[in-house]
Image (spheres, helix red, strand yellow):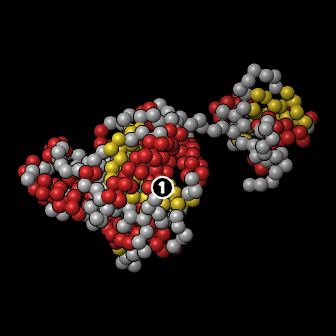
Amino acid sequence: MGDDQAPQKLLRAPAGTHDVLWPESTRWEALLSRFAARAGRAGFGLVLTPVFEDAGLFRRGMGGDSDVVTKEMYEFADRGGRHLALRPEGTASVVRAFVQHRPPTPWKAWYAAQAFRYERPQAGRYRQHHQLGVEVLGTDDPDLDVEVVALAADFYGDLGLRRVTLALNSMGCASDRPRYVEALAAFLAGRAETLCDEHRERIGANPLRVLDCKRPECRAATEDAPRLIDLLDESCAAHLARVRAGLESLGVAYRIEPRLVRGLDYYTRTAFEFASEALAGAQNAVGGGGRYDGLVEAIGGPPTPGIGFGIGIERLLLACDAEGCFAVETPSAAVFVVDLTGGERARDLVAQLRRGGVGALRAYDDRSLKAQLKLADRSGARYAVIIGAEELATGVVTLRPLREDAAQERVPREEIVARLTTLAHPDGAGTATGTGP
Ligand code: HAM
């Protein structure tokens, strides 16, 4: 019998993936709307790209020998034999969309998207995670680097995070990087025996990867490695100086981290990573990004500089938990309608209230007064509207405040919607007669 026909098997979300249920998802909603507001104020618009792309896009974009491409991509052939991959990150997809549609530059895009990486699942590392990100295409003005880094830094601040640090480096460019890679390769060749097995073999292919290795033997061996930051050409050095001056002017604290190379191959000049001191170990990066001035060309577009960042939402929320911040209150409806007359009045009244902009709930299945009042209390509603046989006969409803010590009162049926609308929106928002969805 096929696996999918086994009747007893309890199906669970695949390893490394998570369901986000309500009320936890209210934090996601709040996070997204705060990010959208902040990005919107800086001129960014939302961009949606497909969850899968031609696999070659990521190979070309992220570097054919990066771990994400060689070990972690979810690749598959579709029924038409196309070689596709689930997006492992957002940048290559957004850049592909830019090349395809050629919007006017500078083009500022933000996204909130799943990313898929076949990693060993552990706390803070998942096979499906979500990134909030921005990308800007069309200018290499270093003030934009400042803007982008500050956007992320300010967003962490918005959430109340105080223990996020920023590491900054320059990855150089086509004119100074080859010189550096040569110097680094020569340095590593003299220490090959002390490197981890994986990187001993890869010195030749991409020595920069060794700097990114988290194993203690590689970290020790590269302690005194030459620093790209010391070998930058004049324009890259000036770019970095302007970025640093801008961050200092805006009060964005950072430290220069000469070993920061990031795991993807497209970076040039500015590279940065945000880490949470409240999260332990290797999974403490809550965001990272940088400039990628050659990426558009690498995937077939005209030479166009770009910069962006990605923030892992799951890790960000873990960092918030660890710091005890960004606890979002679950919104509750203003009104709970208790109907003891068969349910039709509750049906109609909640619809009227909702159409008028007031959150309204009710019980189903003809429950007892006690059971309905219990549900009303549990729902967090501020008011219960009770409709019993007596109310029905006299054309009124009982309005009972649930969260304050005030007496209940009888209100004529035809006045209750207006009354509750005023109570729910004392500032005048919402209308009693609105018929919107
Ligand atoms: P990245 O550093 O690979 O960069 O990922 C960005 C963020 O996504 C990380 O800092 C981390 O918070 C989160 N993240 C990455 N992998 C996982 C995982 N397996 N589980 C949970 N969270 C994860 C990029 O992806 C670049 N596209 C960022 C960028 C945008 N660079 C320029 N523009």
Task: State the residue in front, 106 or 356.
Answer: 106
Quadrant location, the C terminus? bottom right
Q: How many numbered marks have been drawn onto this rendered protein structure? A: 1
- Identity of the residue furthest to the right in this view: 394
Would you place residue 3 above or below residue 39 in this image? below
Quadrant location, the N terminus? bottom left
Give the class, few, some or many, for how many residues have Cα within 10 Å of label 1's Cα (few <14, many ≥20): some
Mark 1: amino acid: Leu
Please provide percent x and percent y for residue 398: 83, 31
- Identity of the residue furthest to the top in this view: 405
Task: State the residue in front, 400 or 204.
Answer: 204
**Circle 1: element type:** helix
Would you place residue 404 above or below residue 36 in this image? above
Name which residue lies at 33% across and 44% down. 256
- Residue 6 seen: no
Q: Quadrant of residue 254?
A: top left
| Image side of residue 345 versus residue 113, left or right | right
Please provide percent x and percent y for residue 67: 27, 58
- Identity of the residue furthest to the bottom in this view: 80
| Image side of residue 23 versus residue 128, left or right | right
Name which residue lies at 27% across and 61% down. 176
| Image side of residue 122 versus residue 392, left or right | left
Task: State the residue in front, 423 or 164.
Answer: 164
Q: Quadrant of residue 405?
A: top right
Task: State the residue in front, 366 or 184.
Answer: 184
Name which residue lies at 44% across and 61% down. 140
Residue designated by label 1: 144
Please provide percent x and percent y for residue 58: 35, 66
Name which residue lies at 47% across and 31% down. 324
Would you place residue 320 above or below residue 17 in this image? above
Please provide percent x and percent y for residue 369: 73, 31
